[in-house]
Image (tube, grey):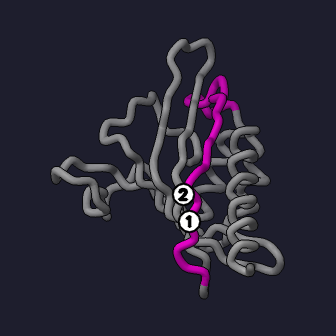
Amino acid sequence: MERLLLQYEVEQWLYREAEYLDHLDFQSWLALMAQDVVYQMPICMNVADTRSAQDYSRETFIFNDDRNTLQMRVDRLNTDFAWAESPPSRTRRLVTNVRLVEVEPEITVLCNVLIYRSRGADIEADLISGERKDVLRREGDSLKLVRRWFLIDQTTINTRNFAIFV
């Protein structure tokens, strides 16, 4: 029963995070991050006939952020200098297939994510899909994100910029 309750708590945390991002509530989203968070999206490489973790760079990233760089990105989005997000993207994040891998000492979670993104009056929208590996830590009575590793499904990312959070 404990594991089911933890699964539910983690799922609700993931859904709340997606809601904050979709509604551009970046301060509430940032409050979900641990002080020592590592937030990474490695590039996907075509190096083999099969898809595996080795198909992702351990050295080159689309983004490789910590708490300070996440704060800087959020602060920039609240200025007149966030040209890549003017007008702001309209996004919808679908979080599915949530699996708890480890629960002690921290909670390791795998989930699939599909992000729909439209911009301004553009007719075409972006679809960004991948698997996230998150590590959550209990701090008091809440969960905080300690690590995010987003493995994007696309080798060539068909979007004008990556100014959104995954």
Tell me residue 42's x, y (percent).
38, 55
Q: What stretch of residues is rendered in magenta? A: 80-103
Residue at 61% in and 76% down? 107
Q: Earlier in the sequence, mark 1 or mark 2?
A: 1
Residue 119 highlighted magenta (yes or no): no
Q: Nearer the viewer, residue 49 or 71?
A: 49
Residue at 64% in and 33% down? 91
Tell me residue 85's x, y (percent).
61, 30
Residue furthest to the bottom: 105
The residue where tag 1 is placed is: 99
Q: Nearer the viewer, residue 86 or 105?
A: 105
Three-letter residue code for mark 1: Arg
Residue at 81% in and 80% down? 140
Tell me residue 48's x, y (percent).
16, 53
Q: Quadrant of residue 81?
A: top right
Mark 1–mark 2 Cα distance, whole angstroms, equals 6 Å
Say which element carries label 1.
strand
Residue at 50% in and 57% down? 132
Three-letter residue code for mark 2: Cys
Classify residue 104 as left or right of residue 29: left
Could you tell me which quadrant the N terminus lies in?
A: bottom right
Estimate how packed mark 1 is, as few (under 14), some (14 to 19) or many (20 or more) residues with alpha carbons within 10 Å: some
Q: Quadrant of residue 61?
A: bottom left
Question: Residue 127, relative to residue 109: is it above or below?
Answer: above
Q: Disc 1, disc 2: CB below 8 Å?
A: yes
Tell me residue 57's x, y (percent).
29, 59
Estimate how packed mark 2 is, as few (under 14), some (14 to 19) or many (20 or more) residues with alpha carbons within 10 Å: some
Residue furthest to the left: 48
The residue where tag 2 is placed is: 111
